[in-house]
Amino acid sequence: MATEEVHKPASLPPYPEMIFEAIAALNESNGSNKTSISKHIESKYGDLPAGHSTLLSHHLNKMKDIGELVFLKNNYMKADPNAPPRRGRGRPPKPKDPLAPDAGLASSRPRGGQPKDPNAPPKPVKPKMATGSGKPRGRPRKMAKPSGGMGGAATTTVEMVTGTRRPRGRPPKVKPAVNEVTVEN
């Protein structure tokens, strides 16, 4: 079974060679598209692997990313070695300035403020200047919460009268008291 699975013809050159050969043979001024490259390879080599179209697409994209091929208006052509590199979309990266070999990072100033001199005299304390309004600057401090809450007086009176706290929810409807009336004949 292992011999049946491997049916790769030994006469096929690598795909990049076949692609370069096809572009050179087609010799189109604007480059060659993927279909014409594929047809040329099929006509010349005949017996190609089953995934020829995916292999061709993979190698074309790989060669385009490396810079061996230039992709312009849906056509592939050989890259000109004298041409400047094409810039992609977006903002170009900032140029990196190489550091001089003698200027190391250790010679630069350390981060933070200057170190304190132990022999220096202490700094004089600045007196606080009063603002003209008499109010302190900034947001006022929060007041302490009252202990009884918003209705503190009412709840304490109910508690004093009934002896228990008021239950949660709506109070039950008060039914009027019915006096028993007896009728005598």
Image (spheres, rainbow, N blue to C red):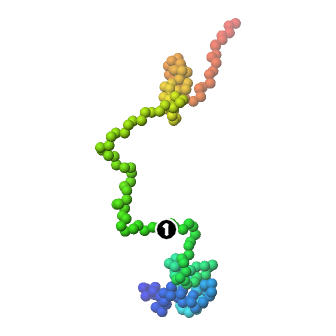
Report the residue that reaches farthest toward the right. 185
**Depth check: 179 or 41 in front?**
41
* Residue 57, visible in the rendered structure: no
How far from the left and from the top, in percent, is residue 29? Answer: 62, 86
> Is residue 125 left or right of 144 when viewed as pictured?
left
Report the residue that reaches farthest toward the left. 119
* Residue 94, visible in the rendered structure: yes
Q: Quadrant of the C terminus?
A: top right
How far from the left and from the top, in percent, is residue 105? Answer: 37, 62
**Depth check: 182 or 185 in front?**
182
Residue appearing at x 54%, y 92% in the figure: 45
How far from the left and from the top, in percent, is residue 150? Answer: 55, 26
Residue appearing at x 32%, y 43% in the figure: 120
The residue indicated by pointer 1 is 95
Callout 1 amino acid: Pro
Tell me if residue 159 comes above or below residue 124 in the rendering. above
Local SS, label 1: loop
Tell me if residue 41 comes above or below residue 153 in the rendering. below
Residue appearing at x 58%, y 82% in the figure: 76
Residue appearing at x 49%, y 68% in the figure: 95
How far from the left and from the top, in percent, is residue 157? Answer: 53, 19
**Depth check: 107 or 45 in front?**
107
Tell me if residue 112 comes above or below residue 56 in the rendering. above
Tell me if residue 176 comes above or below residue 42 in the rendering. above
The image shows a total of numbered marks equal to 1
> Is residue 7 left or right of 32 when viewed as pictured?
left
Q: Quadrant of the N terminus?
A: bottom left
Q: Residues within 10 Å of mark 1 (few under 14, many from 20)?
A: few
Report the residue that reaches farthest toward the top. 185
